[in-house]
Image: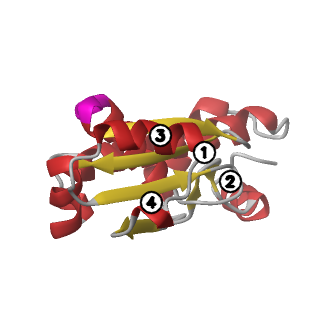
Amino acid sequence: MNTLFITEKSMFFASESLKNELNEVYNGSDIINIAYTDYGGTFVGKCLIEYVSSQFPDSIIKENTSWSGENAFIFGEIANEIIKDDIFCFYDFGDFYCEKCYKEEEIAFRDFVNSNENIKDKDGAFDYLIENYSGYYFRIETTGLDFSESDLIQKLETAGFIN
């Protein structure tokens, strides 16, 4: 994960307004600076920002960035807990992350099936992909699931969903 654990305030990567906001709430604890865009960062980072924002809103400040991204500082006891443990064991973040991955797969497979005119049974093809290839493509980017269209076409041809 592209996470920066900060020990010196001079190392912050953020706009001046976000740095000033951090100065107002900083209590001497560890700080995690994490960011993502359509072109950088990780899906884990994107999910962590969303999770902490919804579950611990008093422990995060964030700003929108270019290219559909966010830049955030996580601080206080929550930052300490994330740093000391496996991130997927942090409260129920592991479950949250898995649910987000599954939703990204559903979106990608549904969009792929719906956009392919050669698929005769779209619901059947979607169900087939979810049942047989959920978790198969390990690369989920901040913009969605990274998969090979030609690979999926071949799999759907073999299964009889494409003539």
Q: Nearer the viewer, mark 1 or mark 4?
A: 1
Residue closest to the eye, 44 or 35: 35
Question: If you read the primary sequence from the N terminus, does the residue marked by circle 1 or circle 3 appear first?
Answer: 1
Q: Which residues are magenta?
A: 54-58
Classify residue 98 as left or right of residue 107: left
Tag shown at residue 20: 3
In terms of secondary structure, what is the magenta stretch mainly?
A: helix
Q: Nearer the viewer, mark 1 or mark 3?
A: 3
The amino acid beneath tag 1 is: Ser
Question: Which image quarter holds the N terminus?
Answer: bottom left
Residue at mark 4: 135
The local crowd at label 3, few if under 14, some if 14 to 19, many if 20 or more residues have their Cα within 10 Å, is few
Inter-mark Cα distance, 1 to 4: 37 Å
Examine the structure image and report whether residue 32 is included in the region drawn in magenta: no
The amino acid beneath tag 4 is: Gly
Classify residue 87 as left or right of residue 99: left
Classify residue 92 as left or right of residue 36: left
Residue closest to the eye, 100 or 27: 27
User: Toward which corner of the image does residue 23 lie, by quadrant?
Assistant: top left
Question: If you read the primary sequence from the N terminus, does the residue marked by circle 4 or circle 3 appear first?
Answer: 3
Question: If you read the primary sequence from the N terminus, does the residue marked by circle 1 or circle 4 appear first?
Answer: 1
Residue at x 69%, y 36% (from the top left corner):
111
| Label 3 with label 2: CB-CB less than 8 Å | no
Residue at mark 1: 15
Position in image of residue 89 (x %, y %): 17, 59
Position in image of residue 73 (x %, y %): 40, 48
Residue closest to the eye, 93 or 12: 12
Inter-mark Cα distance, 4 to 3: 41 Å
Position in image of residue 131 (x %, y %): 44, 49
